[in-house]
């Protein structure tokens, strides 16, 4: 196929599909497809695939944690639209090297998360996959149609907010790649990569609150995911580098291993936090809402007229849109 970016492949596929259907509210182009189920109620559909050697490495990723992650990265999409996950499909491509103990541990982690969210595994597929394990998960969620939160609703002068700290998962991956896991000093970073815990319930509360305009989850890095919001909403964004939330553990690891923690926070991906925009007058109410859920949110920029994502740092401005992780083919 040659070198194609993930975005170009998606655009090519989207250009060949049917234009729509009466009950299809949103197809390709957001965290989930949105389909009208009944008057006032919609279904949310999302799918994600994890490939051994690309998304996980068995030399450090324990099967139980991998099972948990396979679920949570999909639930993150449902939460980012404001919904509640209900049903799930699991397809596994397994190699000859997979043993029953590994599969049992993987399913234990997988089913533990389903129980936590009261979600039912309804089916899937199992195949032989040659030399690499492949895990594909599809989730169906539900919510009130009035509260669906799309990427395309950001407005100029909105403030840009994120949950949690950014770059921890990318820092954890780097530590694992360097053979530094388990490492008690940086265990929080490694766990962010191995066992992400997206704020799914908070996404639902934010959508229902009426306080926000646009929202999505942070899977490919702030630079790329915020650019998706800007492109869909036909706006631009300014990010203040000094306001990007970095954990103490990430900054400590950066000093020891000599990397730029801000670069990981902007481009690293797999944080599975939320990025959302809201009018400035709603700021205090948003802080209070999230505080009641024991989740800290940080305002790190604003939406502007124009396009692109600009990082403001040390008196300089730099375009960073779509600088995060992207598959190439």
Image (tube, rainbow, N blue to C red):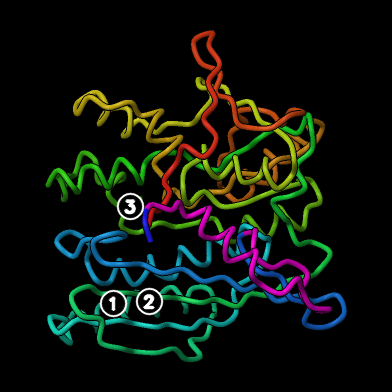
Q: Give the crowd class for mark 3: few <14, some 14-19, many >=20 residues within 10 Å.
A: many
Q: Please provide percent x and percent y for residue 63.
A: 24, 71
Residue in view at x 56 percent, y 18 percent: 312
Q: Which residue is mark 3?
A: 193
Numbered range of the magenta stretch: 3-30
Foreground residue among 227 and 163: 227
Q: Give the crowd class for mark 1: few <14, some 14-19, many >=20 residues within 10 Å.
A: many
Q: Please provide percent x and percent y for residue 264.
A: 37, 35
Residue in view at x 48 percent, y 73 percent: 116
Q: Earlier in the sequence, mark 3 or mark 2?
A: 2
User: Does the CB distance between marks 3 and 1 fall below 8 Å?
Assistant: no
Q: Please provide percent x and percent y for residue 226.
A: 59, 41
Q: Please provide percent x and percent y for residue 241.
A: 51, 22
Whether the magenta-drawn stretch holds residue 21 is answered as yes
Determine whether the residue tagged by mark 2 lies in a helix, strand or loop. helix
Q: Which residue is mark 1?
A: 106
Q: Which residue is mark 2?
A: 110
Determine whether the residue tagged by mark 1 lies in a helix, strand or loop. helix
Whether the magenta-drawn stretch holds residue 15 is answered as yes
Quarter of the figure with residue 175: top left
* Left or right, residue 85 beside residue 304: left
Q: Is 198 drawn above or below residue 171 in the view shown?
A: below
Foreground residue among 211 and 234: 234
Tell me the CA gap for discs 2 and 1.
6 Å
User: Does the CB distance between marks 2 and 1 fall below 8 Å?
Assistant: yes
Q: Is 157 drawn above or below residue 178 in the view shown?
A: above
Q: Is 9 drawn above or below residue 326 in the view shown?
A: below
Tell me the CA gap for discs 3 and 2.
16 Å
Residue in view at x 34 percent, y 43 percent: 170
* Left or right, residue 213 beside residue 221: right
């Amino acid at each position: 196929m040659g070198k194609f970016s993930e975005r170009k492949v998606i655009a090519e596929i989207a250009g060949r599909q049917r234009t729509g259907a009466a009950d299809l509210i949103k197809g390709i182009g957001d965290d989930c497809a949105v389909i009208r189920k009944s008057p006032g109620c919609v279904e949310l559909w999302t799918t994600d695939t994890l490939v051994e050697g690309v998304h996980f490495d068995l030399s450090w990723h324990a099967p139980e944690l991998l099972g948990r992650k396979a679920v949570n990265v999909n639930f993150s999409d449902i939460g980012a639209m404001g919904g509640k996950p209900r049903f799930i499909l699991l397809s596994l491509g397994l190699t000859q090297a997979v043993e029953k103990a590994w599969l049992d541990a993987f399913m234990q982690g997988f089913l533990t998360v389903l129980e936590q969210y009261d979600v039912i595994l309804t089916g899937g597929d199992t195949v032989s996959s040659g030399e690499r394990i492949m895990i594909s998960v599809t989730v169906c969620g539900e919510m009130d149609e009035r509260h669906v939160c799309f990427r395309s609703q950001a407005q100029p002068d909105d403030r840009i907010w994120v949950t949690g700290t950014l770059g921890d998962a990318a820092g954890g991956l780097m530590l694992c790649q360097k053979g530094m896991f388990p490492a008690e000093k940086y265990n929080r970073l490694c766990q962010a990569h191995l066992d992400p815990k997206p704020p799914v319930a908070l996404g639902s509360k934010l959508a229902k609150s009426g306080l926000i305009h646009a929202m999505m989850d942070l899977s490919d890095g702030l630079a790329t995911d915020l650019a998706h919001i800007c492109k869909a909403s036909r706006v631009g964004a300014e990010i203040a580098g000094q306001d990007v939330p970095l954990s103490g553990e990430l900054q400590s690891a950066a000093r020891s291993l000599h990397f730029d923690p801000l670069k990981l926070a902007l481009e690293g991906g797999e944080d599975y936090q939320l990025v959302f925009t809201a009018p400035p007058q709603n700021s205090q109410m948003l802080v209070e809402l999230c505080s009641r859920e024991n989740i800290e949110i940080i305002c790190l920029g604003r939406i502007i007229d124009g396009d692109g994502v600009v990082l403001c740092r040390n008196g300089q401005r730099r375009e960073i849109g779509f600088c995060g992780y992207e598959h190439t083919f």
